[in-house]
Image (tube, rainbow, N blue to C red):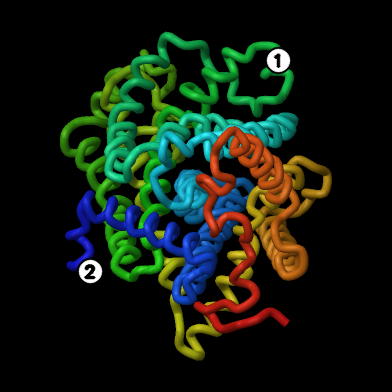
């Protein structure tokens, strides 16, 4: 583990440049490297398994009780609230890296990747707005916010890796401060799930809520995409890079809550929050609940000490750092697990990773099905049986679909229209494959001959 702390910004750029040169060499030779194809499959297996784990965690947050009989947060809420959504955002950044061949996009070849990202954002946003009927008290639909984040992330694909990392740090530190300054000057958010009616009726208010004042403000959540884009450009098949990511993730996930506790308890942050309670819009009980259960994307602006909080969905620097750390650690664990090569451990890990990866490979479809289910009359179960029923149904469906049809239904739709936009843009003098990753088109490539597991379905 001590070797991983020496990874520098130069190392990040060298990893991205080596990746670019390897891709160019394979294209020149007209055939993939035999040693690199299994690595790509292993990488996809670990990334998709991380998506699947984040999906199960998000379903738990939506389906299981937040508090116990004593009014305290349940263990699953403490473990997953805020972290599941952040993991999706970081993995979305990894997906953008895969979409752009895990390298910096050159300005002269940018039309294809930009078109693909814009159309992908619009498609995901449209799916999210179609779910606008869903009860926000049951689950807030995150997809429209993802659409805005994808659009904001477009300039990032043209930056070198070290500058993307610096941008993420700056966003994590500065965006919460800017949000703190802007909130008193902006309209109160509705906290309803937006639909097409809001887009047509008041697009400015909708954009403001999705960007600054909502539960998933794209302005601050851009830090997650930066982290994912940096990670996605690394050589994720190398043990050193994975261990660096694991160590960094664990350090952030532990250090941020400790720093918050010190600031709030030792340096008087809680006292200042209590003193300014009359102007915070919350009474004493509500402040206690806020600190225990988190917020809706921001904190009160009565005192700057609110930015020392690390509770879920508060959008503070420490919240962003802690949840980014947990997302990095989750991805690192799944990547390490996908590297298992020995007999019995390999087969045991396969039984867990492959169903998770199947679910993670069609997470947009399953997330949409989850939102529709918990807002329907079909959800008549008690919390725990209802959660288990969803997990069993979704995992079984995903594995069966993955083993027969491959890409999920909504994933296939989004990929088809974004790929069409990329090809259309490429006709204007750009090479057809500009910006597209050989890992992106076929999420089930590891199904045929899984190198990391050695296990085949059926």
Tell me if 202 is positioned left or right of 436 in this view: right
Q: Secondary structure at mark 2?
A: loop
The residue drawn where x is 48% and y is 66% is 29
Q: Secondary structure at mark 1?
A: helix
Q: Nearer the viewer, residue 178 or 94?
A: 94
Tell me if 223 is positioned left or right of 45 in this view: left
Q: Residues within 10 Å of mark 1 (few under 14, many from 20)?
A: few
Residue denoted by label 1: 200
The residue drawn where x is 69% and y is 79% is 457
User: Between marks 1 and 2, how big is the CA–CA gap?
Assistant: 53 Å
Q: Give the vertical position of 109 relative to 190 (above or below).
A: below
Question: Residue 416: x and y, percent?
Answer: 70, 46
Question: Residue 293: x and y, percent?
Answer: 46, 40
Residue denoted by label 2: 1
Question: Residue 44: x and y, percent?
Answer: 53, 63
Please identify the quadrant where the N terminus is shown.
bottom left
Question: Residue 292: x and y, percent?
Answer: 41, 40
The residue drawn where x is 75% and y is 30% is 133
User: Picture quarter containing residue 306?
Assistant: top left
Q: Give the vertical position of 86 relative to 381 (above or below).
A: above
Tell me if 200 is positioned left or right of 179 in this view: right
User: Picture quarter containing residue 422?
Assistant: top right
| Marks 1 and 2 close (CB-CB < 8 Å) | no
User: Picture quarter containing residue 311?
Assistant: top left
Query: Would residue 9 be visible to someone looking at this image?
Result: yes
């Amino acid at each position: 583990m001590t070797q991983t702390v020496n990874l520098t910004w130069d190392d990040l750029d060298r990893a991205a440049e080596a990746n670019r040169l390897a891709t160019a060499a394979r294209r020149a030779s007209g055939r993939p490297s035999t040693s690199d194809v299994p690595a790509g499959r292993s990488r996809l297996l670990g990334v998709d398994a991380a998506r699947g784990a984040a999906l199960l965690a998000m379903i738990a947050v939506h389906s299981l009780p937040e508090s116990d009989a004593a009014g305290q947060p349940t263990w699953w809420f403490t473990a997953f609230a805020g972290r599941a959504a952040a993991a999706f955002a970081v993995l979305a950044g990894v997906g953008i890296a895969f979409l752009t061949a895990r390298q910096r996009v050159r300005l002269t070849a940018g039309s294809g990747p930009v078109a693909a990202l814009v159309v992908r954002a619009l498609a995901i946003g449209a799916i999210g707005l179609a779910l606008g009927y869903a009860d926000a008290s049951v689950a807030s639909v995150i997809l429209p916010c993802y659409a805005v984040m994808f659009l904001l992330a477009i300039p990032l694909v043209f930056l070198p890796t070290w500058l993307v990392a610096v941008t993420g740090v700056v966003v994590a530190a500065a965006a919460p401060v800017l949000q703190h300054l802007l909130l008193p000057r902006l309209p109160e958010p509705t906290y309803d799930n937006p639909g097409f009616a809001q887009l047509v009726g008041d697009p400015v208010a909708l954009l403001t809520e999705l960007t600054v004042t909502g539960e998933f403000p794209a302005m601050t959540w851009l830090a997650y995409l930066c982290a994912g884009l940096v990670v996605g450009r690394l050589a994720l098949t190398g043990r050193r890079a994975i261990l660096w990511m694991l160590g960094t993730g664990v350090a952030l996930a532990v250090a941020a809550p400790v720093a918050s506790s010190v600031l709030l308890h030792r340096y008087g942050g809680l006292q200042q929050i209590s003193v300014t309670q009359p102007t915070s819009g919350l009474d004493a009980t509500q402040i206690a609940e806020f600190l225990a259960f988190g917020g809706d994307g921001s904190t009160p602006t009565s005192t700057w000490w609110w930015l020392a909080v690390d509770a879920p969905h508060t959008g503070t620097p420490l919240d962003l750092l802690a949840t980014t750390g947990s997302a990095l650690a989750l991805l690192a664990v799944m990547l390490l697990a996908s590297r298992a090569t020995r007999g019995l451990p390999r087969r045991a890990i396969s039984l867990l990773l492959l169903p998770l990866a199947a679910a993670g490979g069609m997470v947009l479809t399953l997330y949409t099905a989850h939102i529709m289910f918990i807002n329907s009359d079909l959800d008549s179960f008690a919390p725990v049986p209802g959660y288990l029923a969803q997990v069993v149904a979704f995992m079984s469906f995903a594995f069966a679909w993955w083993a027969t049809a491959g890409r999920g239904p909504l994933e296939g739709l989004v990929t088809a229209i974004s790929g069409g936009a990329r090809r259309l843009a490429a006709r204007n003098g750009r090479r057809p494959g500009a910006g597209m990753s050989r890992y992106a088109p076929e999420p089930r490539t590891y199904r045929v001959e899984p190198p990391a597991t050695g296990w085949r379905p059926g």
